Amino acid sequence: NKESSSSRGALIVLEGLDRCGKTSQSGRLYKYLDEQGHSVESWRFPDRNTGVGQMISSYLANESQLDDHAIHLLFSANRWEKRSLMEDKLRSGTTLIVDRYSYSGVAFSSAKGLDIGWCKAPEIGLLAPDLVAYLDISPEKAAERGGYGGERYEQLEFQEKVARSYSALCDPSWKVIDATLPVVDIEKKLREVVLDCMMACQKGKPLSQLWP
Ligand code: TMP
């Protein structure tokens, strides 16, 4: 059948603190893969274009207030509303580069003191990434980069808590890349791990679900 005869795309997730350089690296990676002739798309969460995404966006801009649990579930719902499209794309051979995913969901909400098991529960059944690349930077270094845009979570003290949450979530399969290296070096390391991962997916690595 079609599914077993054609190779699938890879689900690549980039994670890290605010100002770690994820967004510019996902842009560079997208451009590279696209130019190499791969079928690839660049995604991000929160996806602010949906109705749920607009609620999240207004919360992040401090234009609305929400209970910590409620906003957590909205971030998760925002991933669920894209799940079937995500699966269709992957199965039809498109690689997705995703800027933030369930790990951001759990890291940011558990940094507020919510129970980690409770935070993980609504993510169960979403597609598991084939690769998590963590761009590693200390909260202090990230803050020095400036450009904290004044959104709700862009404060040193909170980012320190998020960094601790990410450490608790990080597992040996994550590719941790030093985000303080020169941009081109990060780009090179990222390409290497991504190309390996895409190859494994082409060779038949099955799609799986959170949490493995
Ligand atoms: P962004 O700056 O990458 O658009 O993300 C907006 C903020 O939302 C960022 O501080 C991380 C946070 N966030 C969560 O708290 N939970 C989530 O599930 C996601 C995807 C992001």
Image (spheres, helix red, strand yellow):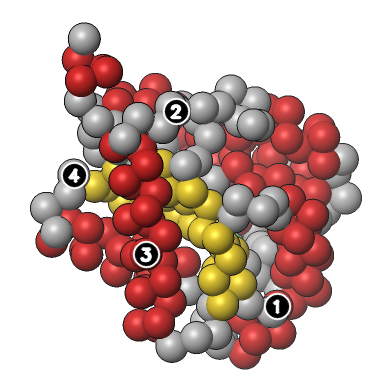
Disc 4 to disc 3, C-alpha distance: 17 Å
Disc 3 to disc 1, C-alpha distance: 26 Å
How far from the left and from the top, in percent, is residue 207? 44, 28
The relative height of residue 155 versus residue 143 in the rendered view (above or below) is above
Decide: marks 3, 2 in contact (CB < 8 A)?
no
How far from the left and from the top, in percent, is residue 162? 74, 62
Sequence order check: which comes first, mark 4 or mark 1? 4
* Residue furthest front in the image: 203
Decide: marks 2, 4 in contact (CB < 8 A)?
no
Residue placed most toward the observer, 123 or 172? 172
Residue at numbered disc 2: 207
Q: Residues within 10 Å of mark 2 (few under 14, many from 20)?
A: some
Residue at numbered disc 1: 139
Disc 2 to disc 1, C-alpha distance: 33 Å
Residue type at the position of mark 2: Leu
| Left or right of 46 on screen, residue 59 | right
Is residue 131 visible from the viewing direction of this image?
A: yes
Residue type at the position of mark 1: Pro
Residue type at the position of mark 4: Ser
Element at label 4: loop
* Residue furthest top in the image: 1
Residue at numbered disc 4: 39
Element at label 2: loop
Residue type at the position of mark 3: Glu
